[in-house]
Amino acid sequence: MYYDTLYLMDSLSGYASPKMKLTSLVKSGEYTRIRRGLYIKGDDYNLKTLANVIYGPSYISFEYALSYYGMIPERVETVTSAVYNKNKDKVFDTPAGRFTYRYINARLYFYGIDRQEENGEPYLIASKEKALCDVLYKIKNTGDKINIERLLFEDLRIDEGEFLRLCITDLKFIVPLYGRILHDKMLEYLKTRRK
Protein backbone atom coordinates (compact mmCIF):
# COMPACT_ATOMS: atom_id res chain seq x y z
CA MET A 1 0.00 0.00 0.00
CA TYR A 2 1.20 3.52 -0.72
CA TYR A 3 0.46 6.83 0.97
CA ASP A 4 0.57 10.35 -0.36
CA THR A 5 1.66 13.39 1.64
CA LEU A 6 -1.89 14.72 2.02
CA TYR A 7 -3.10 11.47 3.56
CA LEU A 8 -0.14 11.30 5.94
CA MET A 9 -0.45 14.97 6.95
CA ASP A 10 -4.12 14.38 7.74
CA SER A 11 -3.39 11.22 9.75
CA LEU A 12 -0.64 13.04 11.68
CA SER A 13 -2.71 16.18 12.28
CA GLY A 14 -2.80 15.49 16.04
CA TYR A 15 0.91 16.32 16.30
CA ALA A 16 2.14 19.89 16.78
CA SER A 17 4.13 19.57 13.55
CA PRO A 18 2.86 16.79 11.27
CA LYS A 19 5.67 17.51 8.81
CA MET A 20 8.36 16.99 11.49
CA LYS A 21 6.61 13.83 12.66
CA LEU A 22 6.62 12.46 9.11
CA THR A 23 10.34 13.27 8.81
CA SER A 24 10.89 11.39 12.08
CA LEU A 25 8.88 8.37 10.83
CA VAL A 26 10.95 8.30 7.63
CA LYS A 27 14.23 8.51 9.60
CA SER A 28 13.13 5.66 11.88
CA GLY A 29 12.32 3.50 8.85
CA GLU A 30 8.61 3.17 9.59
CA TYR A 31 7.85 4.92 6.29
CA THR A 32 10.00 5.02 3.16
CA ARG A 33 9.92 7.90 0.73
CA ILE A 34 9.57 6.55 -2.81
CA ARG A 35 9.49 9.93 -4.51
CA ARG A 36 8.29 13.38 -3.61
CA GLY A 37 4.82 13.07 -2.11
CA LEU A 38 4.72 9.23 -2.17
CA TYR A 39 5.54 6.88 0.71
CA ILE A 40 5.28 3.20 1.61
CA LYS A 41 5.11 1.63 5.06
CA GLY A 42 7.53 -1.23 5.68
CA ASP A 43 7.22 -4.07 3.20
CA ASP A 44 3.49 -3.51 2.72
CA TYR A 45 3.44 -2.51 -0.95
CA ASN A 46 2.82 -3.88 -4.42
CA LEU A 47 5.41 -3.10 -7.13
CA LYS A 48 2.80 -3.15 -9.88
CA THR A 49 0.54 -0.67 -8.08
CA LEU A 50 3.52 1.56 -7.30
CA ALA A 51 4.50 1.52 -10.98
CA ASN A 52 1.12 3.01 -11.87
CA VAL A 53 1.33 5.83 -9.30
CA ILE A 54 5.00 6.85 -9.42
CA TYR A 55 4.64 8.39 -12.88
CA GLY A 56 1.66 8.51 -15.10
CA PRO A 57 -0.77 7.99 -16.44
CA SER A 58 0.95 4.68 -17.08
CA TYR A 59 0.40 0.96 -17.47
CA ILE A 60 2.89 -1.90 -17.02
CA SER A 61 4.16 -3.25 -20.33
CA PHE A 62 7.27 -4.15 -22.33
CA GLU A 63 9.68 -6.73 -20.87
CA TYR A 64 8.14 -6.74 -17.39
CA ALA A 65 4.70 -7.67 -18.75
CA LEU A 66 6.19 -10.27 -21.12
CA SER A 67 8.00 -11.85 -18.16
CA TYR A 68 4.85 -11.66 -16.02
CA TYR A 69 2.92 -13.64 -18.67
CA GLY A 70 5.75 -16.18 -19.13
CA MET A 71 6.45 -15.07 -22.70
CA ILE A 72 10.18 -14.59 -22.08
CA PRO A 73 12.39 -16.80 -19.90
CA GLU A 74 14.11 -13.96 -18.03
CA ARG A 75 12.93 -12.62 -14.71
CA VAL A 76 12.76 -8.86 -15.15
CA GLU A 77 13.74 -6.79 -12.12
CA THR A 78 12.96 -3.35 -13.56
CA VAL A 79 9.24 -2.61 -13.76
CA THR A 80 8.73 -1.24 -17.27
CA SER A 81 5.69 0.87 -18.07
CA ALA A 82 4.26 2.85 -20.98
CA VAL A 83 3.34 6.54 -20.71
CA TYR A 84 2.04 9.09 -23.18
CA ASN A 85 2.25 12.88 -23.50
CA LYS A 86 5.65 12.86 -21.80
CA ASN A 87 7.83 12.92 -24.98
CA LYS A 88 10.75 11.19 -23.26
CA ASP A 89 11.58 8.08 -21.32
CA LYS A 90 12.13 8.32 -17.57
CA VAL A 91 13.74 6.13 -14.89
CA PHE A 92 13.06 6.21 -11.15
CA ASP A 93 15.50 4.42 -8.83
CA THR A 94 13.64 4.02 -5.55
CA PRO A 95 14.10 2.03 -2.33
CA ALA A 96 11.37 -0.30 -3.65
CA GLY A 97 13.13 -0.92 -6.98
CA ARG A 98 13.75 0.55 -10.41
CA PHE A 99 10.84 1.79 -12.49
CA THR A 100 11.27 2.66 -16.17
CA TYR A 101 8.69 4.60 -18.16
CA ARG A 102 8.84 4.55 -21.96
CA TYR A 103 7.00 7.05 -24.09
CA ILE A 104 4.47 5.80 -26.64
CA ASN A 105 2.19 7.77 -28.93
CA ALA A 106 -1.13 8.77 -27.32
CA ARG A 107 -3.15 7.00 -30.05
CA LEU A 108 -1.69 3.67 -28.86
CA TYR A 109 -2.21 4.16 -25.15
CA PHE A 110 -5.83 3.23 -24.50
CA TYR A 111 -6.13 -0.20 -26.14
CA GLY A 112 -5.19 -3.62 -24.82
CA ILE A 113 -4.85 -2.65 -21.15
CA ASP A 114 -6.23 -4.85 -18.38
CA ARG A 115 -7.10 -3.80 -14.84
CA GLN A 116 -5.90 -6.47 -12.44
CA GLU A 117 -5.69 -6.76 -8.68
CA GLU A 118 -3.18 -8.28 -6.30
CA ASN A 119 -3.86 -8.41 -2.56
CA GLY A 120 -6.67 -5.91 -3.02
CA GLU A 121 -4.46 -3.39 -4.82
CA PRO A 122 -5.40 -2.56 -8.43
CA TYR A 123 -2.98 -1.90 -11.27
CA LEU A 124 -3.05 -1.52 -15.04
CA ILE A 125 -1.06 -3.91 -17.22
CA ALA A 126 -0.86 -4.50 -20.96
CA SER A 127 -2.31 -7.70 -22.36
CA LYS A 128 0.21 -10.16 -23.82
CA GLU A 129 -0.58 -8.92 -27.30
CA LYS A 130 -0.24 -5.25 -26.35
CA ALA A 131 3.03 -5.81 -24.43
CA LEU A 132 4.61 -7.50 -27.46
CA CYS A 133 3.40 -4.70 -29.75
CA ASP A 134 4.86 -2.11 -27.34
CA VAL A 135 8.24 -3.89 -27.40
CA LEU A 136 8.20 -3.97 -31.21
CA TYR A 137 7.23 -0.27 -31.27
CA LYS A 138 10.51 0.65 -29.56
CA ILE A 139 12.66 -1.28 -32.08
CA LYS A 140 14.17 1.20 -34.55
CA ASN A 141 15.29 0.92 -38.18
CA THR A 142 14.18 -2.62 -38.97
CA GLY A 143 13.36 -2.09 -42.64
CA ASP A 144 11.51 -4.51 -44.89
CA LYS A 145 14.13 -7.27 -44.81
CA ILE A 146 13.85 -8.11 -41.11
CA ASN A 147 13.73 -11.81 -40.27
CA ILE A 148 10.70 -11.78 -37.97
CA GLU A 149 11.28 -15.33 -36.73
CA ARG A 150 14.85 -14.54 -35.66
CA LEU A 151 13.77 -11.26 -34.07
CA LEU A 152 11.01 -12.88 -32.01
CA PHE A 153 12.62 -16.12 -30.91
CA GLU A 154 16.35 -15.34 -30.83
CA ASP A 155 16.70 -11.61 -30.24
CA LEU A 156 13.66 -11.04 -28.01
CA ARG A 157 13.64 -14.65 -26.72
CA ILE A 158 9.84 -14.93 -26.96
CA ASP A 159 8.59 -18.39 -26.01
CA GLU A 160 7.33 -19.93 -29.25
CA GLY A 161 4.44 -21.77 -27.60
CA GLU A 162 3.25 -18.62 -25.85
CA PHE A 163 3.58 -16.67 -29.10
CA LEU A 164 1.37 -19.17 -30.92
CA ARG A 165 -1.30 -18.76 -28.20
CA LEU A 166 -1.64 -14.99 -28.77
CA CYS A 167 -5.16 -13.83 -29.67
CA ILE A 168 -5.23 -13.03 -33.40
CA THR A 169 -8.53 -11.14 -33.02
CA ASP A 170 -6.95 -8.76 -30.48
CA LEU A 171 -3.86 -8.34 -32.64
CA LYS A 172 -5.96 -7.58 -35.73
CA PHE A 173 -7.39 -4.63 -33.80
CA ILE A 174 -4.17 -3.43 -32.12
CA VAL A 175 -1.58 -3.89 -34.91
CA PRO A 176 -3.02 -1.32 -37.38
CA LEU A 177 -2.87 1.35 -34.65
CA TYR A 178 0.93 1.09 -34.63
CA GLY A 179 1.14 1.58 -38.39
CA ARG A 180 4.50 -0.18 -38.73
CA ILE A 181 5.68 -2.87 -41.09
CA LEU A 182 7.26 -4.80 -38.22
CA HIS A 183 3.90 -5.22 -36.48
CA ASP A 184 2.25 -6.29 -39.74
CA LYS A 185 4.99 -8.88 -40.33
CA MET A 186 4.57 -10.26 -36.80
CA LEU A 187 0.81 -10.68 -37.30
CA GLU A 188 1.21 -12.29 -40.74
CA TYR A 189 3.84 -14.66 -39.33
CA LEU A 190 1.50 -15.66 -36.50
CA LYS A 191 -1.38 -16.28 -38.95
CA THR A 192 0.92 -18.43 -41.14
CA ARG A 193 2.10 -20.50 -38.18
CA ARG A 194 -1.47 -21.05 -36.92
CA LYS A 195 -2.72 -22.53 -40.23
Image (cartoon, rainbow, N blue to C red):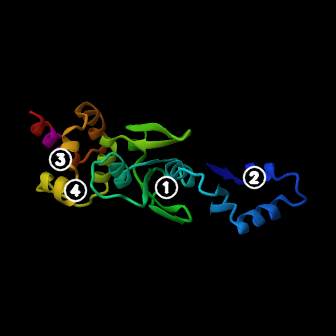
Residue 186 on the magenta span: yes
Element carrying mark 1: loop
Q: Are dots 4 and 1 in contact, CB under 8 Å?
A: no
Separation of disc 1 and disc 3 at Cα?
A: 34 Å
Q: Earlier in the sequence, mark 1 or mark 2?
A: 2
Magenta range:
184-190
Q: Residue at x 22, y 37 (%)?
A: 165
Quarter of image, res 128: top left
Residue identified by numbered label 4: 157
Q: Nearer the viewer, mark 1 or mark 2?
A: 2
Q: Amino acid at mark 1?
A: Lys
Q: Is 26 displayed left or right of 63 in the figure?
A: right
Give x and y (percent) for residue 11. Answer: 79, 49
Q: What distance separates the C-alpha of mark 2 from that of mark 3?
A: 48 Å
Tell me the residue at 27%/44% (across/down).
179
**Disc 3 designates what residue?**
160
**Considering only order in the chain, which callout, 3 or 1, is on the residue closer to the N terminus?**
1
Q: What residue did someone put label 1 on?
A: 86
Specify whether residue 27 is painted magenta.
Answer: no
* Label 2 sits on residue: 8
**Mark 4 secondary-structure assignment:** loop
